[in-house]
Amino acid sequence: MMNETVTKSRPRAAKSRMKLAVARKSAPNFVKGRRDFFNYRELGVTDATNGAMRAQVTSASQGLSRPTGWHYHACEMQFVYMLEGWLELEFENGEKCRLEAGDSVMIPGGLKHQETRTSQTMELLEISLPAEMGTIACDPPR
């Protein structure tokens, strides 16, 4: 049997300027978000990745009273994973989807959409690339 030497290099992320981030539910870091009716808990990923990615928990204690309005995000992508409750979305191609706890959606940057309804209480994990994610209001699709 031949002895093989395996050379392991450090993963790419470890070579970058990223750093460890730990966020505790017992010590939440709430930040201002895009919507006044949601609460946004920053998970420390934005600073840890030097703005390459954002991760936050979004929650609501009362359901949407009206749709958010059509918009798109200036980013590479937005990923949403429902933790509790439900959220209904509508997309520019006419597709409607209801996300319930355990469901997820990845929305490419620039895709027009709107949130139309939520359960009375809800919580979701949202990740975006990069961290800075502009929200641009737009006309409804035709």
Image (cartoon, rainbow, N blue to C red):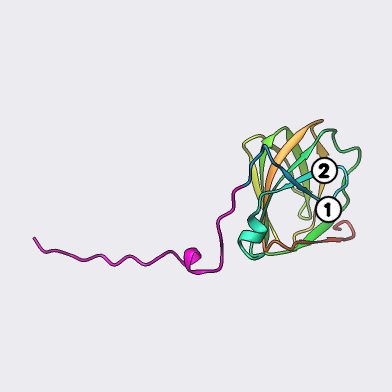
Q: Residue at x 75, y 59 (%)?
A: 111
Q: Residue furthest front?
A: 27
Asked if residue 101 is among those painted magenta in the image, a careful observer would answer: no
Cα distance, mark 2 to mark 1? Answer: 8 Å
Q: Which residues are magenta?
A: 1-22
Asked if residue 20 is among those painted magenta in the image, a careful observer would answer: yes
Q: Which residue is mark 1?
A: 34
Q: Residue furthest left?
A: 1
Please rate how many residues cluster around mark 1, counting C-alpha atoms within 10 Å: few if below 14, some from 14 to 19, many from 20: few
Residue 51 image position (x, y, % from top left): 67, 64
Residue 62, picture quadrant:
top right
SS category of the residue bearing label 1: loop
Horizontal arrangement in the rendering, residue 103 relative to residue 116 (left or right): left
- In this rendering, is residue 123 above or below 51? above
| Most frequent secondary structure within the magenta stretch | loop
Q: Residue at x 40, y 65 (%)?
A: 10
Comparing 137 with 58, the one in front is 58
Residue 4 image position (x, y, % from top left): 18, 65
Query: What's the amino acid at mark 2?
Result: Phe
CB under 8 Å between callouts 2 and 1?
Answer: yes
- In this rendering, is residue 131 above or below 98? below
Query: What's the amino acid at mark 1?
Result: Arg
Q: Which residue is mark 2?
A: 38
Residue 59, picture quadrant:
top right
